[in-house]
Amino acid sequence: MDIHTLRNMAETDISTISKESLIDIKDVTIDMEKGKQERISEFFQQIRNPYCFVCNGIIVKMKYNKNEKTLEEKLDSYFLSL
């Protein structure tokens, strides 16, 4: 996944997305026996758009402060904390 694709995903307008087209976060499973890069790749393959997904029947739109960590840094922190 390249930076251009990620930027397009980040700019997704959730008012134009159908809930059925999004992945429910509860259906994402990560094999914790794999290395960090493999886990991140597995997450992206399953979630398809890390900025928009469904959680408990609600569409979620993630937004990150540009002064904070990048999405990759946040995912690194998340997967290292498990």
Image: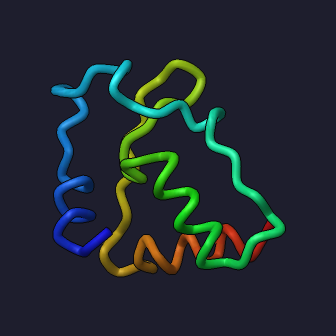
Name the side, left or right, on which 61 lies relative to 38.
left
Look at the picture and state if 54 lies above or below 37: above
> Who's the residue at 47% across and 33% down the image?
23
Q: Nearer the viewer, residue 30 or 76?
A: 30
Q: Position of residue 36 (x, y in %)?
A: 67, 78
Q: Nearer the viewer, residue 60 or 7?
A: 7
Q: Position of residue 48 (x, y in %)?
A: 40, 48
Q: Quadrant of the C terminus?
A: bottom right
Q: Quadrant of the N terminus?
A: bottom left
Look at the picture and state if 77 lies above or below 6: below
> Who's the residue at 28% across and 20% down the image?
18
Q: Position of residue 46 (x, y in %)?
A: 51, 47
Look at the picture and state if 25 lies above or below 78: above
Name the side, left or right, on which 45 lies relative to 35.
left
Q: Nearer the viewer, residue 35 or 9?
A: 35
Q: Position of residue 65 (x, y in %)?
A: 35, 69
Q: How is the image coloured?
A: rainbow
Look at the picture and state if 76 lies above or below 27: below
> Who's the residue at 45% across and 80% down the image?
69
> Who's the residue at 27% across and 64% down the image?
6
